[in-house]
Image (tube, rainbow, N blue to C red):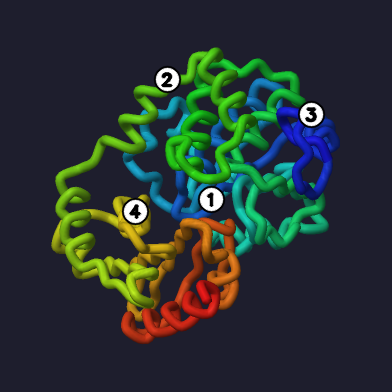
Amino acid sequence: MNGAGGKMQKAAGDLQKIAEELKKLRSAVIFTHTRPDGDTLGGGLALFLALSRCGVRCEICNDSDIPDKFFFLKGIENVKKFPTEENAEAYIAVDSSEEARLGELGEFFSRAKGKRLTFNIDHHISNTLYARFNYVRQCAANCQNIAALIRLLGVETDKDIADALMTGLMTDSGNFSHSDVDGEVFRTAGLLADAGADVDTIGYNVFRRQSAARALLYGRTMSGIRYFLDGRFAVIVITREMLSASGADQSATEGFVDFPLSVDGVEVAAAMLEVNFRRFKISLRSKGKANVNAIAGVFGGGGHILASGCMMFGDAEEIIDKLRYTVSQHLD
């Protein structure tokens, strides 16, 4: 299937067909994944703005608190915790590999099957194709897929839409530094910049700006990096006690996992965030010698080959042992 930019890429579904179905709608709810990042919020917000301009009565939802760093985006105040449009004709999931990734909103989406049109627009290799209409194309950021969809809707990309899409593009590509960044990424970014996307403001808020609490937590976390498998596997642990002591919330830990991966000799890095008693959110990153989507899959998670995640339960040391063994199998 031809993706945006005219390049052949593995994809499931027909984006043109989805655009045609969306243009028929009178109302819709857009779902973004729990513990939101720039790609899900940027893509969801851009689609919200585009559909609203097509005359679709629209809501955008996320079950988590929105990280402060995204409040510079126009329209972010429209994000709700739960849908209020009970009779919406369609539910649209953005940047979510499965219904469970939507958090508490996953139940809303699941119950909608057979009652409403459901759409799933994503870029994760682990996507389960859970909607009636699915478009899943592997690329650096799902905002590439959303940008292509908005063009098919015939909506002009103005500055607000461009800022939202560029935020997703920059965050999921690691500020254009990941190995899956290709010519299409830069072509999309160029079009968004021409439409008025403010790269400096986005870059400052997303990558450079941080609170004193986050800076304190970052220092304490990185001072405790642990190395395994002859230095090829690095682990950081962020406990609830550390969060409380620093005054930071869970959203402040986004991007922490990238630092241990930057250490010479490290091939796989894991960040363990304690989200509840004996419950840890695991973020995995790889330089390329191990498929962390497969590693996360062992524990019921998934994502991308170089960036994935899962939830694990138990004591921290038990979880580290399980991760160390599984990573060793994929590195060897």
Secondary structure beneath label 1: loop
Q: Is residue 275 visible?
A: no
- CB within 8 Å, label 2 to label 4: no
Badge number at residue 23? 3
Tag 1: amino acid: Phe
Q: Nearer the viewer, mark 2 or mark 4?
A: 4
The residue that mark 2 highlights is: 198
Position in image of residue 316 (x %, y %): 32, 80
Q: Earlier in the sequence, mark 2 or mark 4?
A: 2
Q: Nearer the viewer, mark 3 or mark 2?
A: 2
The residue lying at 74 percent from left, 44 percent from top is 90
**Front in this rendered view, residue 330 or 250:** 330
Q: Nearer the viewer, mark 2 or mark 1?
A: 2
In the image, residue 151 above or below residue 173: above
Q: Nearer the viewer, mark 3 or mark 4?
A: 4
In the image, residue 68 above or below residue 217: above
- As measured in the structure, the alpha-carbon distance from the residue carrying label 3 to the one carrying label 2 is 29 Å
- As measured in the structure, the alpha-carbon distance from the residue carrying label 2 to the one carrying label 4 is 28 Å
Badge number at residue 262? 4
